[in-house]
Image (spheres, grey):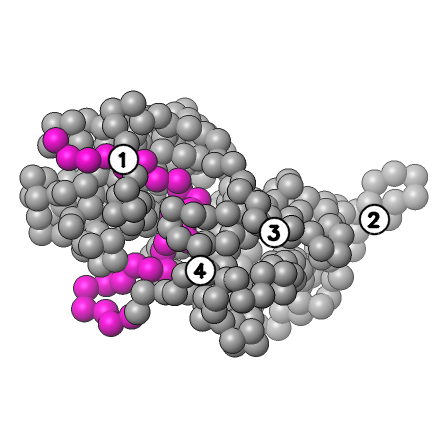
Amino acid sequence: MLTLGIESSCDETAAAVVRDGRVVLSNVVASQHEIHHEYAGVVPELASRAHVEAVLPVVREALAQAGIGLGMVDLIAVGNRPGLIGPLLVGVTAAKALAFNLDRPLIGVDHVRAHLYSGVLVEAGSMRAVPALPALGLVVSGGHTAIYLVEAWNRVARLGATIDDAMGEAFDKAAKVLGLPYPGGPNLDRLASSVGANDRAHDFPISRLGPDSLEFSFSGLKTSMLYAVRGVPGPKGAPAAPLTDQRRVDLAASFRRAAVDAVILKLDRAAERLGSRFGCTLLTGGGVTANSLLRSRLLEWGGRRGVEVRLPPMSLCMDNAAMIAGLGTALHSGGQRDGMDLQADPAALPAEEVLP
């Protein structure tokens, strides 16, 4: 089966062709970083206009790279939730038009859950096995930070999520405080990886939210960075030390360590509470899985726990359509059917709590 995936939930216009739900034949992404750079963040109206201009050229390029014609596509999958409503509407409208004109089935895919599917995808000729389910899932991105229990691809339960900032958003805001350019998260990671960086130079807080909580919170960590750089306000406040180049490096490294420590802490809690219910696999996805420290710490965590950690390749960490096409194929195989009434929805799917 050849599935064409379309993704436009935020500021990347993406299309991909995936064979049999696993083999990535093409994965094309048109980024909008230059458009949003001067605003240090995504402007929804500008993103929507850019998607309108890019969606058809991106689809054509994905088909060309896969070496197929449009008529050879068996299934159309599109990320229809969650995200910015304007960008979502562009992708959903394009997918509906293609499905209608080709008389092919249409599948709507949850963008966040699709990130978990990234570890299933392979290049042509790869012998990598399909990860075992049930599995623990971790999505860390600019808009979402959550832990899941993946019992099957149509049975995914959210166990905990951020109550304020997502991890990627916290990295971006910390980078802005340090005076780093957009996109902030990758630039902070590079700065924190500098030779001589001391990740213990500043003792940033690691959010726990109670002894049993699986929720995340990064707002306190972000505020601590602000105070460290600009000083503590108020009559009992204190001025900040000069922001030298070395201090900027150390603050970036200390911030990154604290954020990653919070993720590892919650993964430990989830693993202990679930026990054997999640098998021996951790599926990960989202833009922050490109963070160098998080990748190494997740692999260490898997080694300590005896768990296979499926990190997406760097090309599939960011928003992409291959994950949409792959998960769309799995959902179609499981019996999901959508029609021309498929709606773009900015809201995430509701949590399905499975823990006592």
Marks 3 and 1 close (CB-CB < 8 Å): no
Badge 4 is on which residue?
A: 134
Give the x, y percent position of residue 181.
51, 47
CA gap, disc 3 and disc 1: 29 Å
Q: In this view, which residue lies farthest toward the right?
A: 236
Asked whether, in this view, residue 101 is left or right of residue 22, the answer is left
Badge 1 is on which residue?
A: 337
CA gap, disc 3 and disc 4: 15 Å
Q: Is disc 4 surrounded by few (<14), some (14 to 19) or many (20+) residues within 10 Å?
A: many
Task: Please tell me which residue is depicted at 13% across the width and 43% down the height of the picture.
Answer: 73
Check disc 1 and give the amino acid type. Arg
Badge 3 is on which residue?
A: 355
Task: Please tell me which residue is depicted at 45% across the width and 54% down the height of the picture.
Answer: 150
CA gap, disc 4 and disc 1: 23 Å
Give the x, y percent position of residue 127.
24, 72
Name the mark on residue 239. Answer: 2
Q: Nearer the viewer, residue 198 or 130?
A: 130
Dot placed on the residue nearer the N-terminal end, 3 or 1: 1
Q: Nearer the viewer, residue 157 or 60?
A: 157
Q: Which residues are magenta?
A: 103-128
Marks 4 and 1 close (CB-CB < 8 Å): no
Dot placed on the residue nearer the N-terminal end, 4 or 2: 4
Check disc 4 and give the amino acid type. Pro
Is residue 104 found inside the magenta-colored segment of the image?
A: yes
Under tag 1, what secondary structure? Answer: loop
